[in-house]
Image (cartoon, rainbow, N blue to C red):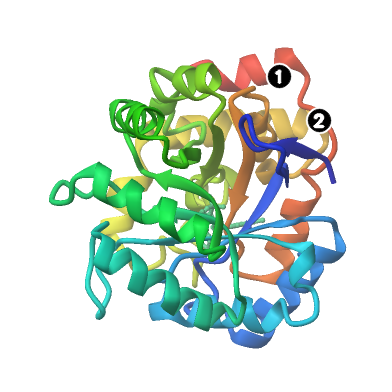
Amino acid sequence: MQYRRLGRTGLKVSEIGLGTMMFGEKTSEAESIRIIQQALDAGVNLIDVADVYAGGASEHIVGAALAGRRSQAVLATKGGRPTPLGQGLSRSHLFKAVEASLQRLRTDYIDLYQVHRWDPETPLEESLSALNDLIRQGKIRYIGCSNFAAWQLCKALWISDVRNYARFDSVQPRYNLVYRDPEAELFPLSRSEGVGVLAYSPLAGGVLTGKYLDAIPEGSRGWQNPQWQEGRLTPEAESAAVRVRAAAQRLNRPAGQIAIRWCLANPAVSSALVGPRTEAQWADALGAAAWTLPADEAAAIGQQ
Ligand SMILES: NC(=O)c1ccc[n+]([C@@H]2O[C@H](COP(=O)([O-])OP(=O)(O)OC[C@H]3O[C@@H](n4cnc5c(N)ncnc54)[C@H](OP(=O)(O)O)[C@@H]3O)[C@@H](O)[C@H]2O)c1
């Protein structure tokens, strides 16, 4: 496994991160725990979860799997999306959300606490002041944001700077061959300001493995889900999957590994967060570690 600095911090994260969104939902607890153990065994330290995944069950599972191995993980969770406890990035909700995550995760600190998305109803000063206090209390160590536009992250960095609050050291956008919006504004900002990027959905939810090119596989995300199909199985996605498949044949590698490596070829990206549903999928993703996609292949795949 290779590691990258998270932005300007001294924290090193594995270039492949384990996304746990399926755990407790489509992946059983037993299989999820095996995947987490395999991740740690392979040197993956970054484990990404959120309070809302599987209604809190994903955090429970991650907490159980890390018993006795907590220090091996860079544990990243998120809060601020609607939950039965409340929602948003108010001081009140963030304090409650962090306590609840700590309990489910069975730990007394979270390495990276990420606000799940922008909250138009809470002043950013309030959220950053609350996160700053949570860092001082030792409950969280670094903070990040997710699904923020570049202007939102820029505003947050500016507030932290002028108020002397801890600042967002990471941003978590969707980023893959089909969805490249972050390249325009977010990545230049991240590189300029030393903010780490955790790229989620590097496989475009499985599309870039090529599995939808012939038929819709039973049990997959797209199976019997017309809404998902409409949003994800677009002509652009199909064309990207075809380019990835061609490169996979040339390089004699599974297509999913090519798609993951393509994300990691962007110097703004600190880690690609893959979200396996099965152990076999996770074993496939781990094969993307520690090699580099040749520049001409990266360029050919990226040609839109
Ligand atoms: N911040 C946010 O708002 C946000 C949003 C989404 C995700 N995330 C994070 O990012 C992580 C990854 O997101 P994601 O799950 O969308 O990413 P992804 O890695 O692009 O997609 C994962 C899905 O692709 C399919 N797949 C994976 N490996 C495969 C293989 N070898 N062959 C065939 N199909 C394969 C599986 O779906 P099937 O069930 O179809 O097999 C799997 O669940 C999440 O777990 C979460 O931690 C964050």
Report x, y in % for residue 27. Answer: 57, 78
Report x, y in % for residue 110. Answer: 57, 64
Identity of the residue drawn at 27% across and 57% down: 89
Q: Compared to 143, does 136 lie above or below?
A: below
**Which residue is nearer to you in this view: 177 or 135?**
135
Left or right of residue 21: residue 122: left
Whether residue 263 is visible here, answered yes or no, is no
Left or right of residue 79: residue 188: right
Whether residue 280 is visible here, answered yes or no, is yes
Q: Which mark is residue 55?
A: none
The residue tagged 1 is 297
* Residue type at the position of mark 2: Leu
Identity of the residue drawn at 43% across and 51% down: 132
Circle 1: is it few (<14), some (14-19), or many (20+) Cα within 10 Å?
A: some
Residue 68 image-quadrant placement: bottom right
Identity of the residue drawn at 64% across and 37% down: 6
Residue 90 image-quadrant placement: bottom left
Q: Are marks 1 and 2 in contact (CB under 8 Å)?
A: yes
Circle 2: is it few (<14), some (14-19), or many (20+) Cα within 10 Å?
A: some
* Residue type at the position of mark 1: Glu
Identity of the residue drawn at 72% across and 52% down: 285
Report x, y in % for residue 37. Answer: 78, 73
Q: Which mark is residue 251?
A: 2
Report x, y in % for residue 167. Answer: 46, 38
Name the secondary structure under disc 1.
helix
| Alpha carbon separation for disc pair 1 and 2 | 9 Å
Left or right of residue 276: residue 77: left
